[in-house]
Image: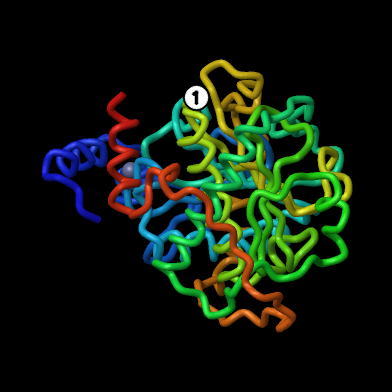
Amino acid sequence: MNLTPEHQAQINAQKKECIYCKINRGEIPGKKIFEDEKSLAILDIYPAKKGHTVFLFKEHYPLPAFIPPDQFKHFFGLIPGLSKALKSALVTTGINMFLAAGGPAGQQFPHMGVHLFPREPDDGFFNLMFKLNTSTDEEITKMLQTNLPIMMQNHFGRNPAEWHTGKGNIPPFLTPIYEKCTVIYEDEKAICVAPKKGAVAGHLQIYSKQEEKYIENLSPEDASHLNFVASFAATAVFEGMQAHGTNVVMVSGESDDNPEGKLILHVLPRMQDDVLKHMFWQPAQPKDDLDAMAKKIKDKTWKLSYKEKKSNIPSYVKPPVMKIGDKKEVKPSTPEDEIKAAIARMQQ
Ligand SMILES: [Zn+2]
């Protein structure tokens, strides 16, 4: 990553004061439940609900654009294993992941990570629920249909995947999605769609073609890929709609707000004081003994490690039909450009 000395100095100053860096350096105690050389998971000491976990990059990345692809792959590759451990330690049916980029989206600290919420029916946690009653203009949809495939093509150019040749096929469980939504991007493993009605204009949904419900059934590589698509979709709506921030909200497994237990990554462009501002939570004193809970979860994470496995994607693949739109519309094309754009946004 080529940061100017000035930007590096700015980040070093942030690191000194950053609460997550302090936990990582051992200057503040944390209720650790998992740790490896690149990542750290701790229980939130003011949990929004039972088992509320903060999963962090050890390195201080102020925004998603700063995360190098290998770090991104490793981090999101651990989500299935971590979800499985949380679900089994706390005996829950589902899991939510919440990622915020930018203050208006609920990013509290300039240090990237995600919140994980184990979920179960009757848990009374509706903070990540939204009403679907806004449609997205055709012009925005067209812009996203042009830009996201190009961004993904650039991504595959930088990080070649031998399984990728085109769009792949439609698994039967996604047939209703194809009928109800507008396809923005698709490959063999993932599809990104614009629903007819979203929570806000520009709301996109990412579905796995491999797994209908449970994130823990995906391989590390496949979970990373799903999150790569979500992350580029977030950049596409952010840049294309001049949003003030973005959220990625993953739902997986059964809960009151996801009774069918579907696995969906919602990508939400955020504006200052928009209708989704309730999506955040108030810090609360824990009702459970966090040390005892951390111990219970650690009993399930001690074997967890990031292992890259070759995926066994089915070999039915259609000829490549990737759409190539007008390249002039895509602003960020290299990691350096994306970082420069992110730095410019931080300074605004
Ligand atoms: Zn930090």
User: In the image, what residue occupies the spot 44% across and 50% down?
Assistant: 327
Up/down of 301 relative to 93, above or below:
below
- Closer-to-camera residue (300/232): 232
Q: How many marks?
A: 1
Q: In this rendering, is residue 240 above or below 211?
A: above
Please state if 24 lies on the left or on the right of 197 as rendered: left
Q: Residues within 10 Å of mark 1 (few under 14, many from 20)?
A: many
Q: Is residue 159 above or below residue 150?
A: below
- Reading the image, the residue beneath label 1 is 104
Secondary structure of the residue carrying tag 1 is helix
Position of the C terminus by quadrant? top left
Q: Quadrant of the N terminus?
A: bottom left
Q: Nearer the viewer, residue 288 or 328?
A: 328
Label 1 sits on what residue type?
A: Pro
Q: Residue at left 67%, top 27%?
A: 200
Residue 20 placement, left or right of 291 = left
Q: Residue furthest front?
A: 326
Q: Quadrant of residue 28?
A: top left
Q: In the image, residue 212 lies at what x, y percent?
A: 80, 61
In the rendered structure, the answer to whether residue 10 lies left or right of residue 234 reads left
| Residue 97 at x, y percent in the picture | 62, 47
| Rendered residue at 47%/47% (across/down) | 113
Is 137 or 347 nearer to us in this picture? 137
Where is residue 169? Give x, y as percent: 76, 70
Residue 19: percent from left, percent from top? 35, 38
When asked about the image quadrant of residue 297, the answer is: bottom right
